[in-house]
Image (cartoon, rainbow, N blue to C red):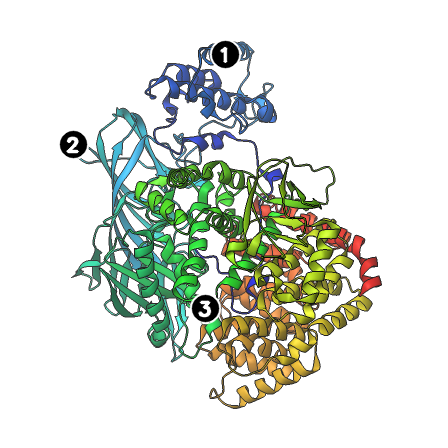
Amino acid sequence: MDLFDSNSADRANLPRNMIENSMFEEEPDVVDLAKDSAAFPAFPALDPDEVAYEPRSSRLLVRGLGENDMDDEEEDCESSARLLGMSFMNRSSAHRSTSSPYTRQAPPRSCSRPSARTMVVCVLFLVIVVSMTMVLNFLPGCNFTRAGCRKPNKTAPIEPVYPISTNGELFPWALLRLPRSIRPLSYDITLNPDLGSMTFTGRTVINMSVFHSTKRIVLHGANLNITKATFKLGDGQASNVTVLEYKPNQQIAVKFSQELKTGQYCVLTLDYSASLSHTYDGFYNSSYTDKDGNKRVLAATQFEPLSARKAFPCFDEPAFKATFLIKISRKSNYISLSNMPKAKSTVLPNGLVQDEFERTSVNMSTYLVAFVVADFSPISKNVSETLVSVYSVPEKKEHAVYALETGSKLLEFYNNFFEINYPLKKLDLVAIPDFLAGAMENWGLITFRETTLLVGNESSPLDKQVVASVVAHELAHQWFGNLVTMSWWNDLWLNEGFATYMQYMSLQTVFPQLDIGNLFLSVRFRAMDKDALNSSHAVSTEVNTPEQVEEMFDSVSYEKGASILLMLNASLPGDQQFRKGIIQYLKQFSGLNTETDDLWNSLTEVELSTQHLNVSEMMSSWTSQKGFPLVTVSRKGDQVELTQEHFLLTSDKATHSSSLWNIPVTYVNDSCSLAPECRQLFTLKNKSGSLKVPASVKWLKLNYRNTGFYIVHYGDEGWAALISALSQNVSVLTHEDRASLIHNIFALSRLGRVSFHLVLNLLNYMSNETETAPVTEALLQLNTIYRLLDKRQESALVARMKNYILKAFGSLMNKQTWVEEESVSKQELRSALLRTACSLKEENCIQHAQSLFKQYAESNGTIRIPGDLQEVVFTVAAQSERDWATLLNMYSKATYDSEKRKMLRGLASTQDTQSLVWILKAGLNGDIIQTPELPLVIATVCNGFAGYLFAWDFIQQNWDSLIEKFPVGSFAIQTIIKSATSQLSTQAHLLQVQTFFSSLKERGSQMRSVQEALETIRLNQRWMDQNLPTLQKWL
Ligand SMILES: [Zn+2]
């Protein structure tokens, strides 16, 4: 999935940040126990029939010790450990963290090869627990509940181990993860959507095999009204069965009196009806207004991560791969699409047409199933064995040409690069008018926002870069994610980190003119900014609840994942090692599920042949712990001492971290600093290490071209030498290295390691800087400080900061033109400079923008504003009441989606309070401004002084509506929280934010992004306290 916070103008600036807080990680609850059972075979469920009327713990233990669901000793030990953990946890949740033998620190894996001693300890432990349990059981009137042994109290409710189904019967499964005893093999799904009543009926036939003998089938189903269910075992007769439902876990189940035996095959057929979803997940209804002003409805799907269960009953976890045959009925003036090519169409007695799609030729995870019923039109092209098509609403068909050309080239590139051909006969890219994510990689049927797929011929290269990059991301998923899939959402980065890395890598190779390098660089900087917080999380992180799964879609999985892959690739010898490793990985695990170690092992195997570094050893230090290192350099003559520590931004002085990374430190020096051959490599595995350089070396620059995921502190002398070198000649370093120095010094200032005076000293060289990456990084950092000062109403400092920025960048700003510009890099530079200039009310900039808007508005569509300048121009226009109204009128009529988005940013930047209130409401309402744009609206409103408190009030007042539209933990919610809080820096605001989020309880108080918001406000507060005097002195 692409999260799409990117937009052509302010991409690097937009939040991708919402990060986990380990403080909020709960100790494993009963529901957490399946976490290590992701791989088959694993811990089978307890049979509820045996526990229903017993004091639970004793019964559980007896079963744990005596049952033979597990095949060998190893699993017996494991399940016993789990059961022990479970019974303890059931008895006293208060003591879970310390008394449970089943905690993260001691995972059941430690049982995998039990020594005799371990066995003795296990047995002794069991005996003690059984005895304790029996004693407790004999206490009069004692019941075991989560709250422990309660005093007799007839009215106190007793919480059962197994939950109660909607019909009052005991539901045979208590965990969030499904049991592993039954595996689906194939699904036959028939769907009849009614776009008039916004409902659908369905029939799902699931063929399954029994992996472990069991008396139950448990699968997912959410909001499905099951009207009929039949079950057939082997060649037997089908008979009606009762389906139990446990809504909180979105699970349904069938219980049997006789065991289904290992190796047997069975078929479950379920008929159901449901409403089309009115949010953006599941099988949902969407609509658009055509060019004649008519409302056209359609239905589309978005299943990742947990919503396939809302469209059909299924084993909705990525490791349960199966084949799918889909039939879907439609009106004759509509088309339907699914993952596979259409096999046949039949006219039904009711006049509707039923399309039947070929059975998927590949096993796939449920989250990749997709279907669309709409009145779209395609354009198509053959690429090798695959028919590539781009679908859009009919009137935007000509906007699809660029995506078709780009998609076709990228498909060819990936076919060659991975040495595995895309396995399906067709690949559809579909622009959905009302779509929340940036895009979704459903196998063979990739869905996009219109903005990320459709561009006009005359759209700017920067707009095309957005489309190319999202298409490249989703196509990479066809291998990374679809062909080889993570076993569970804890390793989501295997999908997203890879697709993000491949998106930049493929574009650099196939479309060098799109100049994607600057974007990738800034994305890496932003990933570090977020990962520096104490609320961050490891790339590979345990997740259980739906909210935790949603929260994995964040910058750590995407951008940090991509960054560490870049670092690995850059530290391997030659340019083919990395590629060979991933080809081996894809071939070895084709059609299967993997964990992070599988990837490192594949890369290590290829690597071994060159006797170089152990990839597994190096990379696990980057995926298993949160954060990244700060490398400090100190030099005495020819001796260079490097030390590493956790770069941890925290306002809490008591927080210590002893994390160590295996860092491939690269460095160049003044005698050779630009060409790749200059780069030298030193592996820093320990707390410190030393290397030698010739005594004549004047300065060192570490992290060559910023390919490593670490920050460097050069010490006073080191910084002074670099600053002096740059002030004499900016070209002594690559532009990536210059940008990396700027990023690092601001980060060090935030950490409190360098004074702001040193930051300003480095920035002095900027008067000679003309390259995009260093300028945009410096502007971004300075604008962030400017906004913080602005929000604190430090008006004297705001004025001085404004003067400082205009003085430092004024000559470069004045050199910018307002006509079409072909180079992407120059467009990026120009839009960043002019956006800053106009936002600081620089006269020249404002005049140019106003006159361009006037010409544009009066030309009736014949004059175009260059794509990279549209946002600047619209933002300036929106500051006048009259032009705001003109812009709103244009917005409602605009057809180019990228242009439309920039108009929206302009509209949301108004400082008029009535208009601000209107636009926030309109975004929530969804008629004039589509609701998926609301996070963008809020982010833009929050940037301005007039709007940020309105937006914060709006979020508090409308929280329930917001989480109805966007799931708790989702990227949209993460963006909203980040936008509203990241510019606050006072104690009063901190308290307000804290009070509001803690009042939410289960409606979002536990989100990582809340923790991140609080941490960020505290850090802002600290930075202000420490640096206001410096700013007053030096600006
Ligand atoms: Zn993705």
Percent coordinates x, y for residue 251 in the rendering: 39, 39
The answer, for residue 224, to whether it is visible in the render is no
Q: Are marks 2 and 1 in contact (CB under 8 Å)?
A: no
> Which quadrant of the view contains residue 836?
bottom right
In the rendered view of the protein, which quadrant contains the C terminus? bottom right
- For label 2, count other residues whose C-alpha is less than 10 Å away and answer few (under 14), some (14-19) or many (20+): few
Q: Is residue 516 above or below residue 753?
A: below
Q: Residue at x 65, y 54 (%)?
A: 744
Label 2 residue SS: loop
Q: What's the distance in space between the residues labelled 2 and 1, CA to CA?
A: 47 Å
Q: Amino acid at mark 2?
A: Gly
Label 1 residue SS: helix
Q: Earlier in the sequence, mark 1 or mark 3?
A: 1
Q: Which quadrant of the render holds ligand 1?
A: bottom left
> Which quadrant of the view contains residue 283?
bottom left
Residue 514 is tagged as 3
- For label 1, count other residues whose C-alpha is less than 10 Å away and answer few (under 14), some (14-19) or many (20+): few
